[in-house]
Amino acid sequence: MDNTDGRNLRSSESWNHAGRPFITTSVLFSFLLGVPFLWKSVEIYRSPLPFHDIDSLSDQIESTPLRFPCNFHAVFVGFRSTDPDNLRSQIQDGINQLTHQNSQCGSCNFSLSVTVQNRDDQCSETLAHSSTTCSYRCGVIKRNVFGVGVDDTVDESLNDVFSGCSEESGKMYSVVVVNKENANGEDEVKAVVGKGRHAWIVGNGLEERYGDMVARVSEIFVKVFMNGGREEDSIQGEFMPVGSDGRIVLSFSLLNSNPRDWVYDWDFQRIDEALLAPVTKALAPIANISVESQVLYHTPKSSFSSWDKKLQSYIFRTSALPFFVNSNEWHLDTSAGASGRSKILQFVVYIPSGKECPLLLQLPNGEISKTNGFISPIWGGVIVWNPGNCDKDSESSSRNTISPQDLEQIVEIFLGQFRQLFGFKSEAFYTSGLGTYKILPSDRGFTEWELDVLSTKHTCFNLHSCSTTLGSLSRLVRSLPRMIIKDEIGEQVKYSLKAAKLAQSNASLGEYSSSASSSREARSLAENAFFHPSIMSVSYFSYEHCFAVYSPFFLPVAGHVVLAALREWKRYKQEKAKYLTWLTRKKTA
């Protein structure tokens, strides 16, 4: 064999040498093995969220509005020949006509019972088809109890009669119609709504006005007990003065317009304990209420007043109310305990200076306001309080304390404004086309049936808000696959769903307060999850963004390694072809 064949042999045998391919392949595989570690280093932690449960809650709230069980009981006392079945049918038709058989959230899934007690205290009744209906003990209600000017006594008496009837399945709302002769002999009909869940109608010759009484009973059940005495069908939840975290801060401020004229202080702690504590306790299932107070000085108003010679007072009109609050001088937002999602309601007592004292509010009809105050929806209320020494020389100064009697009147006006902010009327009357109903005020600011209305409406709004917030969070998380979802967010979502289901369960059982409390917790947890600080992280970039960030560092080197591997593979195939050719020649030789 000549030297040429030897060189060809050595050249052909070199393709089988594994040195260079092995090194190139090792480098390539080292890069490939580093990809999982790189992917792990940029991985975003995402706590699993119950997307199916969130969608189920939203579908359930939209398709099946939440309804509360209500037990209505009408008692007719002093009626001779009245068929309870016929009465029940007519009252039920009246209720359906007033409600239009509405099945919106917060409405009543009612049952109706009717009892007729004649003058001999014998009863005939027709009860609702419910095993939990509280039966009426015949003869307990006496006609002589319903006198003139003893409304509080009658209210306590009916409260004893119907106590314990609202514990098993829904609340028991009762209307007692008493046919009796009034002491003055006049043909007068008196309708009163008590502090509890009962009302009564007293009059002479009511049996002859049978249809009118049936219409009134139906109206009390629907317009008063179900709707809270409002003309609208429901209280709009978005206008209820409760923060998304379920908290309300009542901030009471005493403003001395010009302390050079006089300086007033108040004993607010005593009023808080005596008058405000029962209110905050009654509203505890709906909102966590805290109270604070302050005294400010040099706080002039923004609007102008004019002197009225006839009234001998300075007048400010309703057209100037939008400019009354001086946001530049009234530093009212001083609550350090309220979070950003809590609702702060401002209640201001404005003491005018000596140059505009007394200061009175004139209504559009020309009359002077009895409360001398006004409200601003969602914001709070203002009362103008005139000192008794308006004739004092404005250049002298004195320190005074608002008397307990004046302070109690101020707080009573504030409670009326607070009721208006919740959608109720401040006056103690409800007027309709059928007549006027007197509403007995409660020491707690809200009667039991008003608290029921607040609970049902607030429960519906909270559940709807919870469903909307969780649905928005679900869609946001699904649209951003690299969003950080911590375990805390996942737990808040799960607890929110659990509280929402508990609120629905309590509502179906007629537990109004419990359902309101659970729905408030569900909404608060949903808001906490949606506005969690970790959600605002900057690591929201997509996979394309991730590739664009890391490719300048790894792509150039990886490109050279891949090209080297391709060259070695090409060289390997060429050398193998030469080697096979040499073997063929050798065999033929």
Image: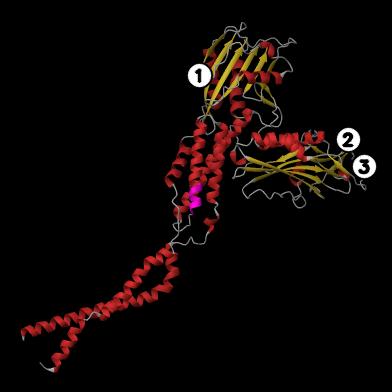
The percent position of residue 104, horizontal first and vertical second, equals: 52, 33
Compared with residue 396, is residue 364 higher up or lower down, i.e. above or below?
above
Number of the label disc, if any, that sits on residue 128 = 1
Instruction: Please tell me which of labels 1 and 3 falls first in the chain.
Output: 1
Number of the label disc, if any, that sits on residue 310 = 2
The percent position of residue 123, horizontal first and vertical second, equals: 56, 9
Q: Give the class, few, some or many, for how many residues have Cα within 10 Å of label 1's Cα (few <14, many ≥20).
A: some
Foreground of the two, 227 or 553: 553
Foreground of the two, 131 or 458: 131
Q: Give the class, few, some or many, for how many residues have Cα within 10 Å of label 2's Cα (few <14, many ≥20).
A: few
Magenta stretch: residue 469 in it?
no
- Of helix, strand and loop, which one carries label 1? loop
Q: Is residue 256 left or right of residue 208?
A: right
Compared with residue 214, is residue 489 higher up or lower down, i.e. above or below?
below
Disc 1 vs disc 2: which is toward the camera? 1
Instruction: Please tell me which of labels 2 and 3 falls first in the chain.
Output: 2
Residue sitting at the far top: 120
Q: Residue at x 51, y 44 (%)?
A: 468
What's under tag 1, amino acid-wise? Ala
Q: Which residues are drawn in magenta?
A: 486-492
How much space separates mark 1 and mark 3, taking CA atoms?
68 Å
Q: Residue at x 46, y 36 (%)?
A: 63
* Residue 354 shows in the view: yes
* Residue 66 shows in the view: no
Asked if the residue at tag 3 contacts the one at tag 1, i.e. Cβ–Cβ closer than 8 Å, the answer is no
What's under tag 3, amino acid-wise? Lys
Query: Mark 3 = which residue?
Result: 392
Magenta stretch: residue 489 in it?
yes
What's under tag 2, amino acid-wise? Lys
